[in-house]
Amino acid sequence: MNSVSKIFTLKIFIPLMLIIVGVLPVSAQQCATINFPLTERDGKEYVALIVGHNDEMIEKYNNKDEISSGQHNYYLAKGKHTLVIEQWPLSKYKKLRHNNKIHKRYLPVQIHSQVVQVNVIDNQYYQFEFLASKDNSTWVNLIKETSRDCVAQKKKIFTAKKENLNKSTSSTDLLPEPLEYRLRRMMTKVATYQENTKSDKSPSNIIPTQFNQIIGSVIDENYALDGKALKVLSVLPYSLANRLKLLSGDLITHLNDTKIQESQLSPNQQFSRYFSALVVGEKIKITILRDNKKQHLRGEYVPVISPEVTYQLTNTSHAPQTLINNKHLSGQISLELDQLVLELNDFYNAQELNQPFIQISRNESFDRSIGLSGNKVLLNGEIGLAIENVDQDSFAEKFGLKQADVLVKINDIAMTDANLASLVKSLSQLKVGEEISLTINRAGEYLTLTDIYQPLKLVAFTLNIDLYSGDNGLAMVEKLQKAYNDNYLRILRYQNNKQNQPKFYPQSYN
């Protein structure tokens, strides 16, 4: 069973944009100027425009004439800005009307979108070029940067992201050991993926704030209870399923008050269909059997909010880059990184640091963990270490060790009650390039494995987590919930009024 596809029961990451755009009053020209010239591709002209700024939405129709000619300038305060940029065919963009309406006879419109982070300084002029390939991958290039006074006049100046007031609290301290280790391995996996793909190999990336609509559960591909239940195999932490307190082994018998019945839909499709019909704030009721006892799990449908993240996979340097493009990661890596970032976000929020973002910087190092765990056993009169788990991509796995092997000698030294702990510990103290031999008992047969110790190199990186972006996401959820509740109340009032009205009389509603 493909657990990844099952976990991604709703494969949607919605970039989060609020409604009101933050701007500064015009003063003292403390800003930078950016511009997007017209571009040509396959004989057609295209325009680029900013439609989102720091998780907030911008009206596309504004400044349409200037944008159509490639003459429109945006004014940004000094600092970091996250921008959502769209590229439109010029002929279609000219048809755009107020409130972003476009007549159906001009549809479809091939619109490309790209998320970037820019870091600007005062009185600089930046010209960016929006590029798109035939496979629909997109990126933005900085094609010109010159000194120029920022003359905003009556134009809006977009505010930069808040910076940490206390630079010394940018989190260079180590995390709890298990979390620190998983972060180092995760960033190394990301670096390996980016190096092995044919796409942009730039060491930087930005992952914007997003509503993560992954339900976060693995449902058995077969119905349970003679077709009357869905069996939960596992639940991701920091997911909607986890918040609803679903557990591995639960048997779902009802979604709201609808009984589970076997149909042409797979169990996972039936489960996903229920959640895909929900709106933010809607009540959820799931009836389950747990240990043969009936329980009702209740909650609200609120997608998990993943904070904005930027990272740089190079030797740590605190000089910010002018431009960082959002780049695609595989589904599995995106899922693992998202889960880890949510855990880091919770960890730092619990510290009550009261700062906008966390910066975690690490230099290149080696993974000294051998990657195995086990227990002492007595086998044929010999003391040994019965291996219970071998970590994926670890030195132990590459060495050839497997679960259920019994390690009895290290470099021809037999294990005893007195030296077992120190011998196993010595594996993490080997020198790079040192030869090592391990004698194991595998299914009754003795084998000696010999290899050169070459630990995994852990990449250098700088990771930034925008803690405030999560707060913006919560504000957006509250707005969506209020909009839903207001609309629901209007419908309810309408229905009640309609029921109370005499027949055949005209009606009016507020």
Image: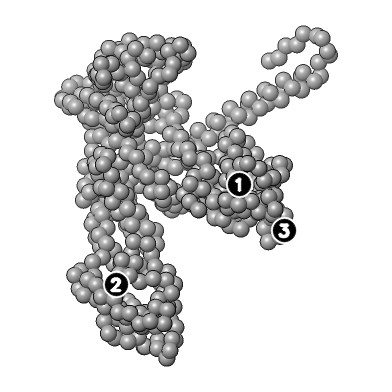
Residue found 34% across the figure and 12% down from its top: 91
Could you classify mark 3 by the number of other residues whose Cα lies within 10 Å: few (under 14), some (14-19), or many (20 or more)? few
Q: Earlier in the sequence, mark 2 or mark 1?
A: 1
User: Can you give x and y, in whole percent of width and height, for residue 486 in the image?
Assistant: 63, 26
Residue found 35% across the figure and 86% down from its top: 415
Q: Earlier in the sequence, mark 3 or mark 2?
A: 3
Label of residue 503 in the image? none
Front in this rendered view, residue 354 or 85: 85
Label of residue 428 in the image? 2
> Image height check: is 55 above or below 431?
above
Label of residue 293 in the image? 3
User: Can you give x and y, in whole percent of width and height, for residue 371 in the image?
Assistant: 35, 67
Mark 1: which amino acid? Pro
User: Can you give x and y, in whole percent of width and height, for residue 54 in the image?
Assistant: 38, 32
How far apart, in angstroms, are the residues tagged by discs 1 and 3?
21 Å
Mark 2: which amino acid? Ser
Residue with the mark numbered 1: 267
Quadrant of residue 259 in the image? top right
Q: Is residue 23 left or right of residue 128?
A: right
Residue 46 visible in the shown view: yes
Q: Are marks 2 and 1 in contact (CB under 8 Å)?
A: no
Residue found 22% across the figure and 25% down from its top: 126
Could you classify mark 2 by the number of other residues whose Cα lies within 10 Å: few (under 14), some (14-19), or many (20 or more)? some
**Which of label 2 and label 1 is nearer to you?**
1
Q: Are marks 3 and 2 in contact (CB under 8 Å)?
A: no
Q: Are marks 1 and 3 in contact (CB under 8 Å)?
A: no
Which element is circle 2 on? helix
Work out which quarter of the rendered image holds the C terminus and state it: top right
> Image height check: is 449 above or below 169?
below
Q: Is residue 233 left or right of residue 389?
A: right
How far apart, in angstroms, are the residues tagged by discs 2 and 1?
45 Å
